[in-house]
Image (cartoon, helix red, strand yellow):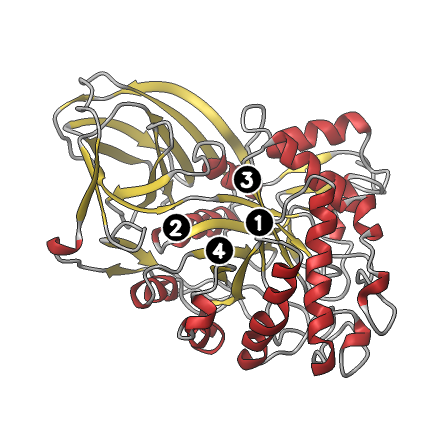
Amino acid sequence: MISAHRKPLGRLVILLSAASLAVVGAALPAQAAGESVDIWLTTTSDPGGRVVTRGLEQQAPVEFGPGSGTGQATIGVDESRAYQEFEGAGASFTDTAAWLMNSSGALSEATREDTMRRLFDPNAGIGLSFLRNPMGSSDLARFDYSFDDTCCDVGDFSIEHDLADVLPLTKHAKELNPAMKIMASPWSAPAWMKDNGSMHQGWLQAQYYGEYGRYFAKYVQEYQARGVPIDYVSPQNEPGCCPGYPSMQWNTEGLMYFAKSALWPAFREAGIGTKTLIMDWNWDGYDTWARPQLQDPQIVGDPLFGGIAWHGYGGDVSAQTRAHDEFPDVKSYDTEHSGGTWIGDQQAEDMLNIIDYTRNWGRSVVKWSLAVDQNRGPHNGGCDVCTGLITVHNGDGRHGEVDYEIEYYSTGHLTKFVKPGAVRIESDDDAAVRNVAWRNPDGSKALIAFNATDATQNVVVNWAGQSFAFDLPANTTATFTWGGAATHTVSAGGGEAAALPVGATRRHGRRRAA
């Protein structure tokens, strides 16, 4: 069981020499003062940060004026310092979420279509742009299942289970947002491949490494054949965790051997270019699960290696910056962090996740189950206190209704305004108004800011010799967007820009039921 825990905010600063910076492009001169700034706000009214009184509500625009200014919170945005690329943010079509939204009968066809558009359409909705789906059963499923339950080869492999709900909804999400990235992660190999004959715990037997590699390849092929490309896989969700639901034991050496001798040969034989993300576990496991793999040139030098997948339930987010400093060419992806009833302030948790993950080199922000019902299920052991972006009412007095939770609006402050291919740019972090800034592929800017205090904060944003002021209400998230061009961009080597002040670090926790 992992307990929720926090630590006071601290500041992490990485100083880079001027010699490490290189000019990579020159933009047009900054536009004259008067550039319009659009503003969207989300506010919660309760101490738990869950009662949404204003959800992604657009405000009257403001304009940049000439010169710099100073406020209670002064945020300078500097496009000359650019960092990592954004690939997407979203959640998971768990068996629970997909079944509730599709074949459970809870939602009418019209409600389901409206819900999908509100989730995935970049214009009509919040434009979720990253899905990480379980490859088989997980703790948020109705029961244990795999894609081949018969020993002793994968000749009977079938994704029939996913054809009912997971695959059609994933495909529709990709149609609504073609920029969508899709990742797949297994909680367990089929039971017959393991030494205990169970989907829960146990070790993959050595004689089945090859078959398990082909199992992955068949999964990717079956999805791709139906118009759903898989961009990333991880060999194991949370290796070694947890009894009570689908899970599997590994050691790091076994994971490395599996990737090199079974998974990647199977992908190559099948002509699959899907990238592998290692670890898929908490920050505090970096030295155990990730660093030894990153020190192996056969791992990081393989074209099928994609980077590190991080979970935010244990340790400190600064591990992501440590990994970047040690291995600057290795990309980081934040692939799971759930909302839940144990979290004291869900809006604050969401926004600090978004800000801290991405200020520490994260290219994605992925929540856990997209949907649960009013009882936070169905669940298959494991987490009975996890929440989703939406709640689908099934069998209660509000049967067929959908609640859009604070996690929907928090995630939307990122996904609706920061497009895949955007680049994080420098912004001055502030203890009262935490923030992160982005430049989209079309040159537009998005500044996401969160006022975690109980008082309105006068925020002044300085950019390209101009400034605007806005009174940001208490317990409120804002996204500010504007066009215009600054002067130039600098970046570091290794394909990523240099991190200067990375911002505050934070610990996060999630309780999993054993």
Q: Position of residue 29 (x, y in %)?
A: 17, 24
Disc 2 or disc 1, which is closer to the eye? Answer: 1
**SS assignment at label 2:** helix
What is the number of the mark on residue 334? Answer: 4
Q: Nearer the viewer, residue 451 or 416?
A: 416
Left or right of residue 260: residue 486: left
**SS assignment at label 4:** strand
Q: Amino acid at mark 1?
A: Asp
Q: CA distance from mark 2 to mark 1?
A: 20 Å
Which corner quadrant holds the C terminus? bottom right
Q: Residues within 10 Å of mark 2 (few under 14, many from 20)?
A: many
Q: Is residue 486 above or below residue 347?
A: above
Look at the numbered discs 4 and 2 and tell me whether their residues touch, using CB distance below 8 Å. Answer: no
Left or right of residue 354: residue 197: right
What is the number of the mark on residue 129? Answer: 3
Q: Nearer the viewer, residue 24 or 42?
A: 24
Which corner quadrant holds the N terminus? bottom right
Q: CA distance from mark 4 to mark 1?
A: 15 Å
Q: Residues within 10 Å of mark 1 (few under 14, many from 20)?
A: some
Residue at the disc numbered 2: 358
Q: CA distance from mark 4 to mark 3?
A: 13 Å
Q: Earlier in the sequence, mark 4 or mark 3?
A: 3
Q: Amino acid at mark 3?
A: Ser
Q: Amino acid at mark 4?
A: Asp
Disc 4 or disc 1, which is closer to the eye? Answer: 1
Residue 372 visible within the image: no
Q: Position of residue 311 (x, y in %)?
A: 51, 62
